[in-house]
């Protein structure tokens, strides 16, 4: 069989291949030849074949069949074989293969070889890829070599020991004696590797750390010699003597000085010296300065030294070299927490880095800028950050937008500024804003009561320009739905109010529904907004039409909403005004119910859960006092209850907590009185009470007539709220048999102390004549002690032009209603 | 410590791969692919540092070769640039005006030089002369044996 081709020959041949397929063919041919050669157990050419295999492996082709051959090469006596064998072992074998353990014996022998270069090969291989088992077996040999006087072997043994410790930390103790006079070496290679070994030991073991603290003076001395010594051609790099060793020593000093006053003090001088004397014109000097700064910041250095360090970083920021600027920004980011004021001094330079062309630098500068924002510089910083947001890469926009929102929330100087900032972010980077910012923004807008008109106007104008950015569109639809009345009435004080008609607004919202740019979530928002406008606008018919169209939408979510809103128009029309009232102020706490639900539904119509802080009732006090006076008696519970709930509501919305805390609302309440959350039909809120809260049909409890006088008849029908049998739900039906309407009809009720009562909004305040219709109103009574239900009612209305008032007591409640 | 050192051409062809951590073959291939993609995508005047997973990546271009290494968080990036430069100097001294072809045709020598400079991801020797001497001596050992055996080296 002819001799296998030489390595260089093969490389040359493979490089002539013009296509991947051609190359593959050549390689397959050669692999076949190599395989047969291996089978023949040919010692002479094994080395050559393995070398070729390694080349093909680098090109990406499989070479596992050469693994055993590497072992045979290592076991050979020839140096060439060993060299290639160990190289192959490092490239093809790793601790995952069982084969590698077979190396252990060979390595052991080679560690004791007479030729130092063979020992070197063994140490190198062990130190690069030795597994834990191998390290355990051979640690003793390594330790022996660590004590040899041969500096070539000593330095390799030191790094091998480092590897052993990384793999098997328990063996660290073993190397302790050998470290005794490592630092008294003159040879830089040994010094360097010794420092690495000491560093590794100190990082892993606090005991070692305290043990080696005594080396600080020696390390300081070595460092000093390096700096002060003259030109040494062997270790010089651009005029600096052995920068690699200097950096390594600085790093070890950092570990030794951290948290220890004495050590830190011992190194103060040398650190100051390095910081001031190192040549900064080349990268190598800056590398040393960088390490020095890191050390100064980590140990207990005196404040003068710390200021010096930050100033060095500040100088780095102005350096032409991008790498140095990047490194400065990274380090400042680490120190901004501890030395905030010092870093603030360099704020303008940092902000300038936002305009750098380099992507890595821009990102660091952005992170650092956010860390530096505070109450004093918010306006200036925000201007820069918004400008940055406009022009930065899309990868940054999401992070930048979130950062801006956070900063604005913490330090906004005024509500108007805050809203303007949000608007700016939404319009410039609207599609990159994170999903959870939408509910947060809505909450913020709701809470800035005086800015509602301004906000809705600006959002409306933004929508006219661009409907592609979904978070912007979602927030805008929500606001228009909520404050549309302010929009059409042109009430804006902050800027020139725009003239917009109801139809125009509805056009925009309907446009969102049909647009291809709108996501399903956005469509949900706009449909709900349109629905809400039914109580704020007068063009109810148009809204009814839109809602009924979407009752047959393919999108199930839209369909469900439309059907439910349709039902609102038809069966529950009397509840619609109460349902669609203005939102109350929401609490800003993170664990608040609304925000949790908001994230799951994507909607913020969850006032039913806003139980943490019920707004106090704005009911005029006189009304209640009148009732109290009229009803007299001490056994009647005060009508107004302003108790704040003592336990927070869970996200599931315990309806019963609401009941316990709500007080009487008298009669129809004008907007924006606090909306009464109970009146929402349960099917809009998943996971809550499955039973309808109200049921006109009595569920087994007979209705009763509570009052019948002067043509006004009031009937009570009953329903139990199933989650809690202590709650009786009473619906009153007021009918008028006279020939004239009863207008301004107000129904009020009071119950004894042991009960709690909640009166919801009536369907209307006109009881039509001749029994043409009725006014319905819902009362919920909590009766925990199951006492007999009694009630005093007061009726006021205008009949034929004159006001009528009447009081009555209702005692004839059927037993089932309160038992 | 350095996790890996890669050399690749402007076309993304790998010329040298040194791994200081045990990683499965599949993972190594992925890292090589990621590194080549990331580094080759960089614009000309950007800084030499990047972030990848939890590693700092330092790269430098010398003629038609990219030298790319992966460092841990506490390692000094600026010094890593010096380490890469030192390796290039060593190659240059050995081959005399080293170019990519030298490394292609003598890749095993490039590894031998590297193994005298770095070990386990750390620097072994800071003196250029010392490394050059060791490599020379090892080469002599190899040649002597070959002459003795009167067989050509590979």
Image (cartoon, coloured by chain):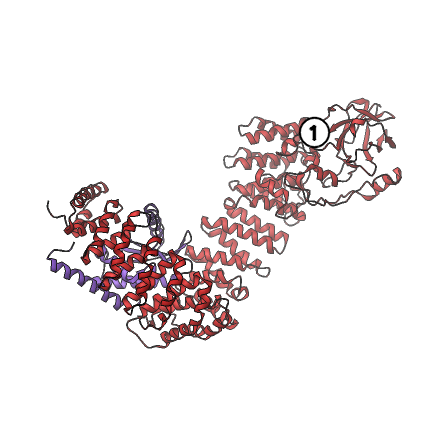
Chain colours: A red, B purple
> Taking the image as drawn, is residue A374 in sight?
yes
- Residue A464 placement (x, y as % from top left): 55, 41
Q: Quadrant of residue A163?
A: bottom left
Q: Is residue A161 above or below residue A34?
A: below
Q: Nearer the viewer, residue A572 or A171?
A: A171
Circle 1 Cα neighbour tier, 10 Å, few/some/many (<14 / 14–19 / ≥20): some
Could you tell me which chain the residue with mark 1 belongs to? A
Q: Which residue occupies 84% across, 27% down?
A: A812
Q: Nearer the viewer, residue A497 or A141?
A: A141
> Taking the image as drawn, is residue A285 in sight?
no
Assign the N terminus of chain A to one quadrant of the image.
top left
- Residue A185 placement (x, y as % from top left): 33, 72
Q: Which residue occupies 53% across, 46% down?
A: A427
Q: Is residue A452 above or below residue A699?
A: below
Q: Name the residue carrying label 1.
A: A573
Q: Which residue occupies 83% across, 37% down?
A: A752
- Residue A308 placement (x, y as % from top left): 48, 71
Assign the C terminus of chain A to one quadrant of the image.
top right
Q: Quadrant of residue A157?
A: bottom left
Q: Nearer the viewer, residue A753 or A252?
A: A252
Q: Nearer the viewer, residue A634 or A740?
A: A634
Q: Is residue A189 left or right of residue A416?
A: left
- Count of residue discs: 1
Circle 1 sits in a helix, a strand or a loop, which is it? helix
- Residue B26 placement (x, y as % from top left): 33, 45
């Amino acid at each position: 069989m002819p001799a296998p081709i030489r390595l260089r020959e093969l490389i040359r041949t493979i490089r002539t291949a013009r296509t991947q397929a051609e190359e593959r063919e050549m390689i397959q041919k050669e692999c076949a030849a190599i395989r047969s050669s291996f089978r023949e157990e040919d010692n002479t050419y094994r080395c050559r074949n393995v070398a070729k295999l390694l080349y093909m492996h680098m090109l990406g082709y499989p070479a596992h069949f050469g693994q055993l051959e590497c072992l045979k090469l290592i076991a050979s006596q020839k140096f060439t074989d060993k060299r290639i064998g160990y190289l192959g072992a490092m490239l093809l074998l790793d601790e995952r293969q069982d084969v590698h353990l077979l190396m252990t014996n060979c390595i052991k022998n080679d560690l004791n070889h007479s030729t130092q270069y063979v020992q070197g090969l063994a140490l190198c291989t062990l130190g690069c890829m030795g597994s834990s088992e191998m390290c355990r077996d051979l640690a003793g040999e390594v330790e022996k070599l660590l004590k040899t006087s041969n500096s070539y072997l000593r330095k390799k043994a030191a790094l091998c020991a480092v590897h052993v410790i990384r793999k098997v930390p328990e063996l660290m103790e073993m190397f302790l004696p050998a470290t005794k006079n490592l630092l008294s070496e003159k040879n830089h290679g040994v010094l360097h590797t010794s420092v690495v070994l000491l560093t590794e030991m100190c990082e892993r073991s606090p005991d070692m750390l305290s043990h080696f603290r005594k080396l600080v003076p020696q390390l300081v001395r070595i460092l000093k010699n390096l700096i002060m010594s003259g030109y040494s051609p062997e270790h010089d790099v651009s005029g600096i003597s052995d920068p690699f060793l200097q950096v390594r020593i600085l790093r070890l000093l950092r570990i030794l000085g951290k948290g220890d006053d004495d050590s830190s003090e011992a190194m103060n001088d040398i650190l100051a010296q390095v910081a001031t004397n190192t040549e900064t014109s080349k990268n190598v000097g800056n590398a040393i300065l960088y390490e020095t700064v890191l050390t100064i910041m980590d140990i207990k250095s005196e404040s003068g030294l710390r200021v010096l360090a930050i100033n060095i970083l500040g100088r780095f920021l102005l350096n032409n070299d991008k790498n140095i600027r990047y490194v400065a920004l990274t380090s400042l980011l680490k120190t901004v927490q501890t030395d905030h004021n010092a870093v603030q001094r360099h704020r303008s330079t940092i902000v300038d880095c936002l305009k750098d062309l380099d992507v890595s630098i821009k990102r660091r500068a952005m992170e650092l800028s956010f860390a530096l924002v505070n109450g004093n510089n918010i306006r200036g910083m925000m201007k820069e950050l918004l400008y940055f947001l406009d022009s930065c890469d899309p990868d940054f926009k999401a992070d930048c937008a979130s950062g801006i929102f956070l900063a604005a929330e913490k330090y906004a100087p005024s509500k108007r500024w805050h809203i303007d900032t949000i608007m700016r972010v939404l319009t410039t980077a609207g599609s990159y804003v994170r999903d959870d910012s939408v509910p947060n923004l809505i909450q913020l807008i709701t809470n800035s009561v005086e800015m509602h008109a301004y906000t809705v106007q600006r959002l409306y104008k933004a929508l006219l320009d661009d409907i592609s950015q979904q978070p912007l569109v979602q927030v805008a639809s929500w606001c228009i739905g909520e404050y549309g009345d302010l929009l059409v009435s042109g009430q804006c004080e902050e800027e020139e109010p725009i003239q917009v008609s109801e139809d125009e607004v509805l056009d925009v919202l309907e446009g969102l529904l049909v647009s291809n740019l709108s996501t399903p979530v956005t469509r949900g928002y706009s449909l709900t907004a349109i629905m809400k406008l039914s109580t704020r606008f007068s063009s109810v018919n148009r809204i009814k039409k839109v809602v009924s169209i979407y009752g047959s939408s393919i999108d199930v979510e839209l369909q469900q909403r439309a059907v439910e809103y349709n039902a609102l128009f038809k069966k529950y029309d009397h509840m619609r005004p109460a349902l669609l009232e203005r939102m109350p102020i929401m609490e800003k706490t993170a664990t608040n119910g609304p925000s949790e639900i908001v994230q799951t539904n994507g909607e913020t119509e969850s006032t039913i859960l806003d139980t943490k802080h019920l707004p106090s009732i704005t009911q005029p006090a006189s009304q209640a006092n009148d009732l109290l006076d009229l009803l007299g008696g001490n056994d009647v519970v005060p009508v107004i209850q302003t108790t704040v709930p003592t336990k927070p509501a869970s996200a599931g919305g315990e309806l019963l907590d609401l009941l316990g805390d709500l007080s009487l609302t008298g009669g129809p309440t004008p907007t924006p009185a606090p909306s009464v959350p109970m009146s929402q039909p349960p099917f809009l809120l998943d996971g809550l009470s499955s039973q309808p809260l109200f049921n006109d049909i009595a569920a087994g409890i007979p209705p009763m007539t509570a009052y019948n006088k002067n043509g006004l008849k009031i009937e009570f029908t009953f329903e139990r709220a199933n989650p809690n049998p202590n709650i009786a739900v009473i619906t009153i039906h007021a009918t008028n048999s006279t020939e004239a309407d009863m207008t301004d009809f107000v129904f009020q009720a009071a119950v004894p102390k042991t009960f709690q009562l909640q009166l919801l909004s009536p369907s209307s305040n006109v009881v039509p004549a001749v029994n043409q219709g009725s006014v319905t109103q819902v009362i919920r009574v909590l009766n925990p002690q199951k006492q007999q239900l009694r009630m005093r009612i007061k009726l006021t209305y205008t009949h034929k032009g004159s006001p009528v008032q009447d009081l009555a007591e209702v005692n004839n409640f059927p037993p089932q209603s309160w038992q | 410590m350095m996790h890996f050192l890669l050399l690749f051409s402007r076309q993304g062809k790998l010329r040298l791969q040194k791994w200081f951590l045990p990683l499965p073959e599949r993972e190594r291939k992925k890292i090589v692919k990621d590194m080549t993609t990331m580094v080759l995508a960089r614009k000309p005047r950007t800084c030499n540092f990047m972030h990848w997973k939890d590693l700092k990546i330092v790269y430098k271009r010398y003629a038609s070769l990219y030298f790319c290494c992966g460092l841990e968080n506490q390692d000094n990036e600026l010094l890593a640039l010096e380490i890469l430069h030192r390796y290039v100097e060593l190659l240059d001294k050995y081959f005399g005006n080293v170019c990519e072809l030298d490394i292609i045709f003598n890749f095993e020598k490039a590894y031998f030089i590297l193994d005298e400079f770095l070990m386990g991801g750390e620097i072994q020797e800071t003196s250029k002369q010392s490394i050059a001497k060791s490599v020379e001596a090892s080469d002599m050992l190899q040649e002597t044996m070959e002459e003795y055996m009167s067989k050509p080296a590979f």
